[in-house]
Image: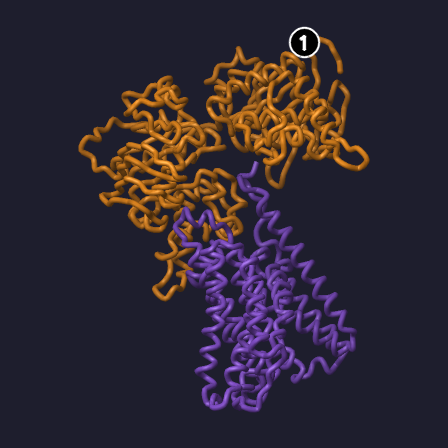
Chain colours: A purple, B orange
């Protein structure tokens, strides 16, 4: 009975596609009315710069979800990179070595991702189990590097805080500029390139990939390494913002990354994990967090809001997927 | 239960009409179903059979018209109402839980309870009671996954009897059965009619079966009721003509060809998979369509998937396009011009992705620059070209592939496969499963066009012998993993081929 498709089948309306964007603006306006200080340039900039970390890890996890897997280790990919760069630069004579160490940290991050995907794609452990295991090991390494506490050092070069605390022309945080550049690159990568297409193909159906000659494992390798790299950048940025590093700084990363990528999957392409959606959702989540704080709301209010949004987003995505899979013959 | 004998009305519908946005799915349908009668419903895909059944089972609510059960008008608000009125349906898809026993599956969802816990003894007793009422021998204490497809289907039907129905609707019940399982299954259906006096509504695409089992035949086309006739008064030709909308079925012409000097594209001797070596001597030549016939699980799919690199190989003795193939990856085989369409249609499509991406994913290298950027306009034009060429019905190129009908998804899959630049061999695995006659004949025409006009080679794997006999130049018969016989077109002999597929030549050398 299904040769014809109802004209409503496509698009699904302007509002359903862009609701997340309008909702974000609405939330922003509401907070601005309730608390005029909210609208200051300062506040907006610090809100954006605090969005950076979440946006980076959220994009990383989005790529993983695109290939149909889960990375439980995003938090430790972030923390370990932060602890690593903090510890190495804390050594005497290293203060001139910031950029080489920066690169080395990225390599360590990428290696973390490589181990994850090796365990998953080669040893065939389900990805969430493999990454759960590696993240526990990374926690151990992190605690060893910091003696279980936090690192903050006078030996760090001035440039250490640049990426997290510096400004371009005194207004735009460098962190925001860097994140924006990475976002654009990731957006182009996921939507306009061959690799992006292949990611979505693997996420849609690994079995079908075999029949059309797509190498599933190769795409997963790219996704896991990219995700770990993005988390490593986030880690470097966060330790630069805080001027300290601990193995626990990524403890919220997984939860909030999952929230934003699920919320993001309701944006533009309903049911599809996508970079622009993740970014809009990250901004939304930070607006809510800042707004609630400025209104003096108790800290549990944000947890309630985040949990509610996560469940709402997952319900929506699940419903959309159910509708899609209904009609295949 | 009424005990009166013979043709007595149990279910009647008057002027049933159901509209969906823009389409009249069922137009003014009036029918009567009697006890002790097997009533077949024929029609192509989209003729309105499923809509009709869904109104009988309370899934859809009719826009107009009335339903009478035992002469009394009843309005079904939900499937439960229809069940309570004694109408039970067995769907085409299997709905059993593999690791549960037959008895547990039969009582699934309404298990008898004792003190809040499931009473396993009562489950067995209840299932046994239904089984003995139906008078059939089938083991109910083993996990259903250990049973054959035919026995599983019978478990499904026993389950449909849980609520003591007087009308049983069977939707394509034999679609998943192997050749040897169909006849015993049909006997079972006959016994339901003769011993229990059931009214049975039988839906099937296989005319042979319809004629073997029916008392009355009804034909639907385009949502309308075309005719209802006792089987004896309706010839098969008349029935087919009634089903097919004018001009949709095409004639297949297989020209006589001499392949003695033709280039050999694929030559195989042995293929090993799952730790076993299989003897599969075959030669596929340029411009030739070779049919693979055999029961489900006889090695047709497995052999070709192993050669294609899709299934893990334990070694093989195969030559393709002049190259010796040992271990291989799908992508290498595709580069060499070998492509296989999946046996299960869902494995050929990317659900959730657009029609455009579903086509272009096979040509991703061709449609992207060296730096890895997609050529957006080229992709669009390419996808559109393939959709038009294959007459796919779609509303938008961004549309999710799962919104297309099964037949149209198959057109996309075959359409993109034959577009490969250096295509040498196309392997079609059950390409016509679940399609109506019109759509099937389009596939046959396409196969002949490929081999006759474009000098490609095709391997056509199917469980329907008739379609292989009409379409192919040569036929290989599989049994238990091996090719046990080969026939060229002049030698085609239906009885002999069927016997071969049932193991008639087991042990003989070919």
Q: Is residue A201 above or below residue A235?
A: above
Name, please, the residue furthest toward the top.
B5
Q: Is residue A276 visible?
A: no
Chain where mark 1 sits: B
The answer to which of B457 and B148 lies nearer the viewer is: B148
Q: Is residue A120 visible?
A: yes
Q: Residue at x 75, y 16 (%)?
A: B1
- Residue B186: x and y in percent read 55, 18
Residue A131 appears in which quarter of the rendering? bottom right
Q: Is residue B357 above or below residue B313?
A: below
B395 horizontally vs B73: left or right: left
Label 1 residue SS: loop
Q: Quadrant of the N terminus of chain A?
A: top right
The answer to which of B174 and B361 lies nearer the viewer is: B174
- Residue B357: x and y in percent read 46, 53
Residue hosting label 1: B6
A199 horizontally vs A304: left or right: left
Name, please, the residue furthest toward the right.
B115
Q: Residue at x 52, y 43 (%)?
A: B404
Q: Residue at x 47, y 44 (%)?
A: B347
Using a 10 Å C-alpha cutoff, classify the residue at mark 1 as few (fewer than 14 neighbours), some (14 to 19) or many (20 or more).
few
The answer to which of A234 and B68 lies nearer the viewer is: A234
The answer to which of A57 and B28 lies nearer the viewer is: A57
Q: Residue at x 45, y 78 (%)?
A: A103
- Residue B53: x and y in percent read 63, 29
- Residue B440: x and y in percent read 43, 32
């Amino acid at each position: 009975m299904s040769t014809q498709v109802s004209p409503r089948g496509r698009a699904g309306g302007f509002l359903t596609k862009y609701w997340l964007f309008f909702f974000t603006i609405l939330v922003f306006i509401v907070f601005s009315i309730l608390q005029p200080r909210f609208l200051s340039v300062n506040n907006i900039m610090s809100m954006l710069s605090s969005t950076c970390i979440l946006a980076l890890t959220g994009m990383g996890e989005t790529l993983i979800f695109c290939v149909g897997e889960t990375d439980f280790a995003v938090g430790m990919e972030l923390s370990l990179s932060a602890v690593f760069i903090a510890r190495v630069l804390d050594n005497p004579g290293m203060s001139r070595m910031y950029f080489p160490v920066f690169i080395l940290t990225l390599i360590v991050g990428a290696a973390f991702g490589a181990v994850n995907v090796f365990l998953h794609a080669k040893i065939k452990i389900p990805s969430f189990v493999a990454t759960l295991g590696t993240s526990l090991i990374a926690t151990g390494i992190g605690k060893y590097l910091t003696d279980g506490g936090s690192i903050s050092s006078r030996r760090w070069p001035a440039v250490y805080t640049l990426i997290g605390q510096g400004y371009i022309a005194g207004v735009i945080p460098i962190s925001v500029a860097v994140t924006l550049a990475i976002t654009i690159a990731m957006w182009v990568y996921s939507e306009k390139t061959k690799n992006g297409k292949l990611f979505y193909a693997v996420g849609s159906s690994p079995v079908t990939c075999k029949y059309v000659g797509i190498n599933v494992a190769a795409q997963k390798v790219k996704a896991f390494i990219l995700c770990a790299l993005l988390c490593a950048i986030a880690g470097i940025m966060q330790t630069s913002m805080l001027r300290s590093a601990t193995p626990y700084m990524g403890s919220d990363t997984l939860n909030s990354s999952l929230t934003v990528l699920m919320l993001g999957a309701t944006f533009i392409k309903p049911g599809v994990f996508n970079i622009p959606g993740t970014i809009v959702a990250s901004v939304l989540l930070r607006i809510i967090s800042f707004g609630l704080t400025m209104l003096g709301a108790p800290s549990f209010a944000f947890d309630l809001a985040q949990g509610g949004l996560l469940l709402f987003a997952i319900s929506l995505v699940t419903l959309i997927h159910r509708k899609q899979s209904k009609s295949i013959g | 239960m009424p005990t009166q004998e013979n043709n007595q009305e149990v279910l009647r519908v008057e002027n049933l009409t159901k509209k969906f946005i823009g389409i009249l799915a069922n137009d003014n349908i009036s029918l009567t179903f009697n006890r002790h009668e097997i009533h077949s419903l024929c029609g192509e895909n989209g003729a309105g059979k499923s809509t009709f059944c869904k109104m009988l089972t309370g899934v859809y609510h009719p826009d107009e018209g009335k339903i009478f059960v035992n002469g009394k008008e009843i309005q079904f608000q939900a499937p439960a109402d229809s069940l309570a009125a004694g109408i039970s349906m067995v769907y085409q898809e299997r709905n059993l839980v593999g690791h549960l026993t037959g008895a547990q599956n039969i009582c699934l969802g309404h298990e008898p309870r004792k003190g809040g816990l499931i009473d396993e003894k009562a489950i067995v007793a209840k299932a046994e009671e239904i089984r003995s009422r139906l008078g059939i021998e089938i083991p109910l204490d083993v996990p259903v996954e250990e049973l054959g497809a035919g026995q599983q289907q019978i478990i499904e039907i026993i389950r449909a009897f849980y609520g003591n129905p007087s009308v049983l609707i069977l939707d394509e019940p034999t679609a998943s059965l192997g050749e040897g399982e169909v006849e015993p299954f049909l006997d079972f259906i006959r016994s339901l009619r003769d011993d229990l006096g059931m009214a049975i509504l039988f839906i099937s695409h296989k005319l042979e079966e319809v004629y073997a089992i029916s008392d009355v035949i009804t034909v639907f086309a385009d949502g309308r009721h075309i005719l209802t006739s006792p089987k004896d008064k309706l010839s098969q030709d008349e029935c087919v003509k009634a089903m097919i909308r004018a001009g949709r079925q095409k004639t297949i012409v297989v020209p006589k060809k001499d392949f003695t000097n033709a280039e050999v594209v694929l030559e195989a001797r042995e293929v090993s998979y799952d730790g076993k070596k299989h003897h599969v001597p075959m030669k596929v030549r340029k411009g030739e369509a070779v049919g693979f016939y055999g029961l489900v699980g006889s090695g047709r799919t497995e052999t070709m998937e192993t050669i294609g690199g899709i299934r893990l190989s334990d070694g093989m003795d195969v030559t393709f396009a002049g190259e010796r193939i040992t271990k291989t990856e799908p992508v290498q085989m595709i580069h060499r011009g070998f492509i296989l369409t999946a046996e299960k249609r869902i494995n050929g499509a990317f659900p959730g992705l657009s029609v455009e991406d579903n086509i272009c994913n096979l040509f991703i290298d061709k449609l992207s620059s060296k730096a890895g950027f997609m050529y957006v306009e080229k992709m669009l034009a390419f996808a559109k070209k393939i959709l038009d060429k294959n007459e796919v019905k779609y509303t938008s190129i961004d549309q999710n592939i799962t919104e297309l009908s099964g037949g149209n998804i198959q057109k996309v899959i075959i359409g993109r496969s034959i577009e490969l630049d250096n295509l040498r061999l196309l392997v079609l695995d059950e390409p016509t499963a679940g399609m109506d006659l019109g759509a099937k004949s389009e596939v046959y025409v396409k196969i002949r066009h490929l081999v006759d006009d474009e000098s490609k080679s095709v391997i056509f794997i199917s469980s329907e012998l008739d379609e292989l006999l009409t379409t192919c130049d040569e036929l290989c018969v599989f049994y238990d993993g091996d090719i046990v016989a080969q026939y060229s077109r002049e030698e085609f002999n239906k009885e002999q081929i069927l016997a071969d597929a049932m193991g008639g030549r087991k042990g003989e050398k070919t």
